[in-house]
Image: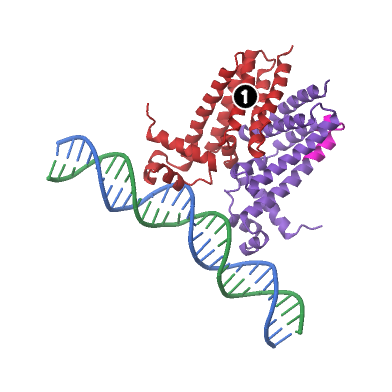
Chain colours: A purple, B red, C green, D blue
Amino acid sequence: MRPTKREELVGKALRTFYAHGFHATGMDRLVEETGISKTSMYKHFRSKEELIVAALKLRDTQFRDWLFHRMAALGKTPREQLLAAFDALTEWVVEPDFRGCMFVKAASEYQEVDNPIHAQAARHKALLLEHFRDLAALAGANDPALLARQLLILKEGAIVAAQVEGCREATVQAKAAAATLLDNALAH
Amino acid sequence: MRPTKREELVGKALRTFYAHGFHATGMDRLVEETGISKTSMYKHFRSKEELIVAALKLRDTQFRDWLFHRMAALGKTPREQLLAAFDALTEWVVEPDFRGCMFVKAASEYQEVDNPIHAQAARHKALLLEHFRDLAALAGANDPALLARQLLILKEGAIVAAQVEGCREATVQAKAAAATLLDNALAH
DNA sequence: CTCATGATGTACTGATCTGTACATGAAAGT
DNA sequence: ACTTTCATGTACAGATCAGTACATCATGAG
């Protein structure tokens, strides 16, 4: 089924925001890129903030779908799937248009905790944590919540290292750390 | 010795940039806050970019001084000092004006790798890595470079979790993970 | 006192920001 | 054919952006 006009606008905005940042991307630029008129743009989205939130929601579903599917494809057991998350990250960070985690960027530019943009970023992280916790429980971890959080900390840290320093090995080094943590958490 | 005018300007700019972001903070605002005139401001710094780089350099020395001194104060052996880094982080993230890592924010808003602001952020991370690698070697790690990188990945990830999700436990959970990695790396 | 020098403040430039008023267009109902 | 309705486009408002031209001021030298 064809994407609606609104979905098309959100998709284009998502790419531009990710590539250039939120404050640095003006509505004029988005209007120019999409070929739509400004009036129509503001018919679809009452404000820039609303457009950003819509873009983050799209990114949330895109990223989770991609990550969870790669994890399921690359790993059979829950333990393997958790480790496979880092293989998926390795595929991602070497892509030429990789620019770090969009939600970290969003939360960085909109820091007030009550800001809808920041809240949307936090929500994404919470959803990731939920999935990891379920898998950690399935894997038989002593403390699934702790293990899930630690693995996600490794994930965020590896992305930051890859983005800020351009470190290519961060994700595989994070995977090695994750393996150690998993071994430790599944032993008893 | 008294701070020079320039140092005072950099210090104030640092606080404002950290609290509100780089693009979101205009030179007009900084001029108003410091009481200086715009002409004088541009006498000290040829451009906003130059001011941001100066602020990041100050932040780099401040943060490294603080972290390394806390690590030395809280830990005796190299191993204890590496772990103590996470205790220091725990002190930091609960401060009311904690807003995440300034260098991650800077690299997020100025993504081009050849941008001086981005480069300054990368440099800070490299200096942290150097210190951690030295300590890991002193601690007798099999692969000091790997261990140092993994510990820093935990550090970045914990800061991100604390900033984006407001997660209070992230730094102590990261410390637990760090302890596991240390145990593993020092065994032979 | 006179004049040069350098720091400072005011007021501005042109560009860009988010958001809107209003004119124009096409399609649909009667 | 005439009017209503709604989507679209143009042009703009008012604020703010980074950066600068120029007037004013204090100070120090001769």
Q: Left or right of B83: which side holds B66?
A: left
The picture places residue A24, in percent across and down from the top left corner, at: 57, 48
Magenta stretch in the rendered image:
A67-81
Q: Is residue A72 magenta?
A: yes
The picture places residue A142, in percent across and down from the top left corner, at: 81, 26
Can you see residue B158? yes
Q: Amino acid at mark 1?
A: Asp
State the quadrant of the N terminus of chain B.
Answer: top left
Q: Is residue B166 magenta?
A: no
Can you see residue B21? no
How many neighbours does mark 1 have within 10 angstroms: few (below 14), some (14-19), or many (20 or more)?
some
The picture places residue B66, in percent across and down from the top left corner, at: 53, 25
Chain letter of the residue carrying label 1:
B
Front position in the image: A90 or B11: B11
Please tell me whether residue C27 is drawn above or below residue B102 in the rendered image: below
Residue drawn at the location 73% of the way across and 29% of the way down: A150
Residue drawn at the location 64% of the way across and 28% of the way down: B155
Main SS of the magenta part reads: helix
The picture places residue B171, in percent across and down from the top left corner, at: 66, 29
Residue drawn at the location 70% of the way across and 27% of the way down: B173
Q: Quarter-wise, where is residue A130 in the image? A: top right
Q: Residue furthest right?
A: A76
Q: Left or right of D27: which side holds B184?
A: right
Disc 1 designates what residue?
A: B87
Secondary structure, mark 1, is helix
Q: How many marks?
A: 1
Please tell me whether residue B182 is drawn above or below residue B50 in the rendered image: above
State the quadrant of the C terminus of chain B.
Answer: top right
